[in-house]
Image (cartoon, rainbow, N blue to C red):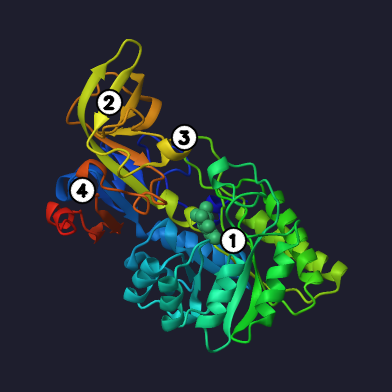
Amino acid sequence: MTLAELLPSTGCSTEPVLEEGLWPDGTRVAGGDLVIGGLPATQLAARFGTPCQVLDERTVRARATAFRTALPRAEVVFAGKSLPCPEVYRWMAQEGLSLDVSSAGELALAKAAGFPAQRIIMHGNVKTAEDLKAALAYGVSRIVVDSLDEIAQLGALATRGQEVMIRVTPGIDARTHAKIATGVEDQKFGFSLASGAALEAVLRVVEQPSLTLAGLHCHIGSQVRHVASYEEAVRRMVGLIASCGTRISQLDLGGGFCAPYLAGERDFDLAGFAHRITGTLNYECGVHRVPPPRLLIEPGRSIVANAGVTLYRVCAVKHGLTRTFVAVDGGMSDNPRPALYGAKYAVRLVGRGGRPKPVTVVGRHCEAGDVLAEDVPLPHDVHAGDLLAVPATGAYHHALASNYNQVCRPPVVAVKDGVARPIVRRETEEDLLRRYV
Ligand SMILES: Cc1ncc(COP(=O)(O)O)c(C=O)c1O
């Protein structure tokens, strides 16, 4: 069963059907308009301007709950980097999730949200002294250490038996994009299991009187489709637990559960994951004669990606030798993922249909690589002033946004039951100027 199948039904409609699984729950086409969270996209664009990142609160909450329901005994930790925003962190706290942060900055957002310290985990292959001090001062429950230098530094800074987890590189190729494959050997994250570095890290932590070893962690990558990759991670990590010679009470498998971006892509098989991972964990612990640790998972993208839709206004249409370019009022500053990883998106024109033709949707930035979507079908007469909607933009969009070309970053507008409210306001020129000395 997939994540979408575990969620409540989205009802039925006689209007054109949207691509399954890509849009927030309940999104529909009505009178040509696109209705998200009970509000027409044209209305949202008129009220909040474009580009505008729309986030459906019900979808976010339903996905967070789906993880907790599928794994009732596990600790579900929202990967805060996927959508850093105090209001979203508040929703997660209310849904009973924990939170992972990867810097003092993300921790500051968590504090602003009043997120309970005992449910916060701090990550990062580099944590500066400021990051560590902020984590210790707020009393975050666990810090995931990623280098011997950090173990020594944290050992010197901590005073009260700070719980730590060790980030392990299990040597697993989760068959995803190289830039988001974090479980393989010879990349910057974690301690290698194969080289013995992970075991050495265990010894170093145990030697530090101010640290308590709470668990082991691994994160094998992002957009991971195959449950088998996680099963293999469990096998290797339990093998390591058995050789630690000390009680390991938590096993954190990280995040990385895939989300669909294009029509026909499957949602992550959450029920299958829950069933197979629990079974594998119990089996491997039996074989190695170790007590099963508590499981933790850290979903980010799979909770927020499909809850988000970005609205853009078409500013110009140009006909090249072989391609038609549709230029919009945003681009790589609000979505650098196509340029970073070759990420692909679906695009829909809001308000009318028409005979489709393939076009390339490009941004407004001074880079030829500022392409949002290639070869997507839009009505042949697409023109300046049209409104475009891009689904699956809830994760790593607001988070990765920049103000390249001093283009102000778009707002994030939460929608729910016909009510819209900005939870991140649009950046202004005063915001930009504030930093210049
Ligand atoms: C340690 C860790 N946990 C969780 C995540 C979340 O991954 P995703 O958003 O793909 O679920 C990441 C993403 O980079 C990560 O580095």
Q: Left of 268 or right of it: where is 126? A: left
> Looking at this view, is 14 or 103 the one in front?
103
Return the mark for residue 408: 4
Q: Which residue is mark 2?
A: 326
The CA span between labels 2 and 3 is 18 Å
Q: Which residue is mark 1?
A: 254
Label whose residue precedes the other's in the sequence (2 or 3): 2
Return the x and y of residue 233 as percentages of the image width and height: 71, 57
Q: Left of 254 or right of it: where is 203? A: right
Label whose residue precedes the other's in the sequence (1 or 3): 1
Type of amino acid at the residue the image marks with label 3: Gly
Q: Left of 209 or right of it: where is 136? A: left
> Looking at this view, is 436 or 123 the one in front?
436
The CA span between labels 2 and 4 is 21 Å
Type of amino acid at the residue the image marks with label 4: Cys
Label whose residue precedes the other's in the sequence (4 or 1): 1
Q: Residue at x 76, y 79 (%)?
A: 246
Return the x and y of residue 289 as percentages of the image width and height: 86, 73
SS of the residue under disc 2: strand
The CA span between labels 4 and 1 is 33 Å
Circle 3/circle 4 CB separation < 8 Å: no
Q: Which residue is mark 3?
A: 342
Q: Is residue 322 above or below residue 62?
A: above
Return the x and y of residue 330 as percentages of the image width and height: 26, 39
Return the x and y of residue 180 as percentages of the image width and height: 54, 47
- On the question of residue 90 being in view, the answer is no
